Image: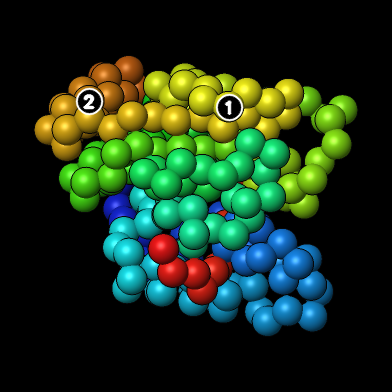
Amino acid sequence: MSRRLVNLTLDTLVDLPHPCRECVVWELEPREAADPCAADPALEKEAWVSQTLLEWGGCGKLAYVDDVPAGYVIYAPPSYLPRAGSFPTAPASPDAALLANAHVAPGYAGRGLGRMLVQAAAHDLARRGVRALEAFGHTGRTGAPDQTGAPDRCVAPAELFVAVGFKTVRPHPRYPRLRLELRSARAWRAEVEHALEQLLDAVPVAGAAGSGVPASAGAGRGERRP
């Protein structure tokens, strides 16, 4: 099995899974995202990716297994992700980028792809001088009032972030905020390469795809400047 990571661009955007490809939960103001009369969400998504790439730089990674899209992450400064301000543990730290979306397809869960994607994002951000990566995680608890307006499927599980090295910086029964301090780009490159070697050693060259439960979060557009 061959595996590769690529940057999120307007060309690779089409490989995001449904409904993430058309979801604008994170990148629009909550009121706009909930408006059924709003512009085409797919076009809004393209506009967000285009503007973010132009103004800030790389904002996502996709993983392919045998040329099949298997997972992705999307990240940007909090100012590009208006939904972030609605979480009870907001705001995100001003020195951090925010990881809004994290998803691994069910058939590829449990193979280390989530860790590899987050590490690739961390390496990219460390290389660009960003000090930390933060995320709002979902604990799975549904009893607490939800003031975010974001579907739970659009917020990645907190346990995913903990598993890849994040630490909770602001606890909450439903939506804790977690943080990953970024080390040097060289250290992240070494960890990514090591994770990839372990992944390739652990999975047979021929065989059926595994099964698992997706770790997912949403996607969208925004016309926000940092």
Which mark is first along the chain, 2 or 1? 1
Cα separation between marks 1 and 2: 27 Å
Residue 191 image label: 2
Decide if residue 35 is on the left or right side of residue 9. Answer: right
The residue indicated by pointer 1 is: 170
Q: Nearer the viewer, mark 1 or mark 2?
A: 1
| Type of amino acid at the residue the image marks with label 2 | Glu
Decide if residue 73 is on the left or right side of residue 9. Answer: right
Question: At 62% across and 51% down in the image, what residue appears?
Answer: 85
Residue 8 image label: none
Secondary structure at numbered mark 2: helix
- In the displayed structure, would residue 226 be above or below residue 94? below
Q: Position of residue 87 (x, y in %)?
A: 67, 43
Question: At 36% across and 50% down in the image, what residue appears?
Answer: 61
Q: Position of residue 86 (x, y in %)?
A: 68, 50
Count residues near mark 2 (Cα–Cα under 10 Å), then give few for <14, some for 14-19, many for 20+. some
Q: Total marks drawn?
A: 2
Confirm whether residue 195 shows in the render. yes
